[in-house]
Amino acid sequence: MKRKPMTVGRLRKIIFLAVFLLLGFLVFVTVKANAVLQKNHDLKMSQATLSKKLDKASAGSLSYNPLVGQYFEKFLNAYYNYNQDQQENWRKGLKPYFSTDLSMTQLGTWSGQQSLKDHQILGIFSVDGIRTAQYSVTLENNGKQSTLIVNIPYEQDNAQFTVVGLPYVSTDLDTVGHVGENRLSKTDKALTDDNTVDDVTSFTKTFLQKYVSSSKDDMALLMDNPQGLAGKVDMVGVDNIKVSGTQNNPVVTAVMTVQVHDTDIKQNQQIRLQLKKQNKTYFVTKMMEA
């Protein structure tokens, strides 16, 4: 069989094809290597995020750090031992415990005298990513004793602690909870539509009144993750209502004042509601307290 002579043109084609295949192989290898590097990077980031979450979850437990219990022993005595004739001293005593952006005027002004008779920690858990200590506290006012369950949101940096929201009344130990710097103070641009603001304000007052007096089951038609205080305290009033967000999805923040039955014991609580417009009313997609 007669072999064809290798011409310069055929040789160029063979060399070009070989170079093309080699470049294609190098591109393929580079893409695969970059994909592996990116996957390893993503895995390391996920691992770091998970480690941070685990550290944050564990760092608040009493078994991990008994300083938590010592800190709240002092805080609860400073917060719940109150005399109307020493209100200024009361606020000054509490100022070191709260975040710097929480105004002491939000503590309220009460009449009479109350004292902390007993307290017991029920648990330390995470609410919306915020460490929260839950306590059962027994207070005495005008000779009567009342027991409340309260949640206290706080931040911890090594051995330093800061209460980042007002303690709020809860129904029972709840590892999901409702609720950060004062985490409810941040709002979007205020809504300027007067009709929407009026409607949201009216709904907020009605909703919070029902929330204080109703059970979880009664609140199921008004909110996701239904919650209710079932009349454990009485509603005194709702103030400082601010409306932001959009007309269809407004966000409202407010300060709600509650009072223990047949006593002068009152407490202010911050509320943040994320709403969704439904026909002529609203539905609460998320509720946070502090």
Image (tube, grey):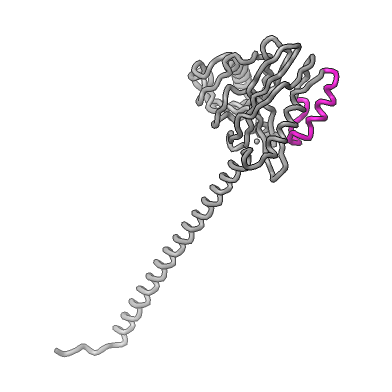
Is residue 103 located in the magenta-colored stretch of the structure? yes
Is residue 135 located in the magenta-colored stretch of the structure? no
Region rendered in magenta: 84-106
Q: Residue furthest left?
A: 1
Q: Quadrant of the C terminus?
A: top right
**Left/right of residue 245 with respect to residue 103 in the rendered view:** left
**Left/right of residue 24 with respect to residue 185 in the rendered view:** left
- Please say if 125 is above or below 89: below
Looking at the image, can residue 240 be seen?
no
Closer to the camera in the image, 201 or 172: 172
- Please say if 108 is above or below 33: above
Main SS of the magenta segment? helix
Residue drawn at x 54%, y 24% is 284
The spot of residue 20 in percent (x, y) is 36, 74
Quadrant in the picture for residue 171: top right
Q: Quadrant of the N terminus?
A: bottom left
Closer to the camera in the image, 281 or 172: 172
The spot of residue 173 in percent (x, y) is 57, 27
Residue drawn at x 58%, y 47% is 52
Quadrant in the picture for residue 70: top right
- Please say if 259 is above or below 167: above
Q: Residue furthest top?
A: 262
The spot of residue 69 in percent (x, y) is 68, 35
Quadrant in the picture for residue 240: top right
Residue drawn at x 41%, y 71% is 26
Looking at the image, can residue 232 be seen?
yes
- Please say if 272 is above or below 234: below
Q: How many marks?
A: 0
Residue drawn at x 68%, y 41% is 156
